[in-house]
Image (tube, rainbow, N blue to C red):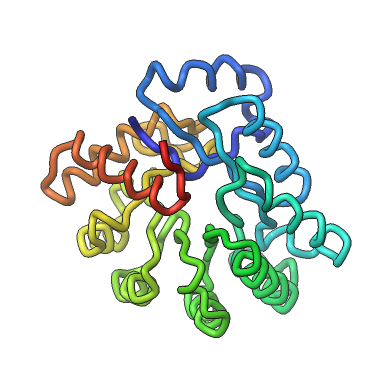
Amino acid sequence: MIFESHAHYDDEAFDEDRDRLLEGLRENGIGYVVNIGANIQTTKNTIGLAEKYPFIYGAAGVHPSDADELNEENFAWLKDQCSHPKIVAVGEIGLDYYWNEPDREIQKKWFERQLNMAREVGLPVIIHSRDAAKDTLDIMKAADAADMGGVVHCFSYTKEVAKEYLDMDYYFGIGGVVTFQNAKKLKEAVEYIPMEKILLETDSPYLSPAPYRGKRNSSLHIPLIAKQIALIKGMDYDEVVHITEENAKRLFRIME
């Protein structure tokens, strides 16, 4: 079964057909979904989805773009949610320098705090890093982030940066961007990264693969991503699906 390692099914883009879509995933070969928290409210939403659907798990965290909503009170609440039996990771957390807000120092502060939180609660992390390769790595190394393990979501850097994460034994979330014609850098990185370190993801409802680019994404599009990885790796599609499923189960400690 396909393991969807990163989606946002609580997003308003799914308000009209969320239940129908989710209930149809398994018959389309999608066996597992990790729904990702991006702020306090979406972490609450994620827990609700994980409690409703047996095949949905969750990550609790605050995205760098929402880092300025954090304070000691809701940070303590966030830490408490990490003990929920369906919460399998802290995320998505990290740095995003594409936009000028929140202030970079605020992003760094709460990235560091959430990394330390992950260590304290014993969960892996889901890393968001956009236009911030060096600072992300510097903070992770200073925090000994190799200790808790995790995945770099929507990996978009070079194979040289990939090596830095491989040295920390991290996984790489590969999504729809790998199907884009202009994704030469990412395709080179995917060729370089060992198959045992790759996870399939969509970031739904964002980043739809070709030929659906610009339209709402869903886990139903993962086969397009897996086929592209298979092509790059010179592997069989079913082998890609199987290996990435085992990788995700191992990272998120889902034993069935």
Residues 256 and 154: in front is 256
Residue at 55%, 27% (x, y): give it. Answer: 54
Relative horizontal placement of residue 147, taking residue 168 as reference (left or right): right
Residue at 51%, 67% (x, y): give it. Answer: 148
| Residue positioned most to the right | 73
Q: Is residue 88 above or below residue 130?
A: above
Count of numbered circles in the view: 0
In the image, residue 169 lies at what x, y percent? 36, 69
Residues 98 and 7: in front is 7
In the image, residue 250 lies at what x, y percent? 39, 51
**Residue 123, located in which quarter of the rendered image?**
bottom right
Relative horizontal placement of residue 56, taking residue 3 as reference (left or right): right
Residue at 66%, 35% (x, y): give it. Answer: 11
In the image, residue 191 lies at what x, y percent? 20, 59
**Residue 101, located in which quarter of the rendered image?**
bottom right
Q: Point out the image quarter for the C terminus.
A: top left
In the image, residue 95 lies at what x, y percent? 60, 68
Relative horizontal placement of residue 41, taking residue 90 as reference (left or right): right
Q: Point out the image quarter for the N terminus.
A: top left
| Residue positioned most to the left | 234
Q: Is residue 106 above or below residue 122?
A: below
Residue at 28%, 39% (x, y): give it. Answer: 226
Q: Is residue 248 above or below residue 227?
A: below
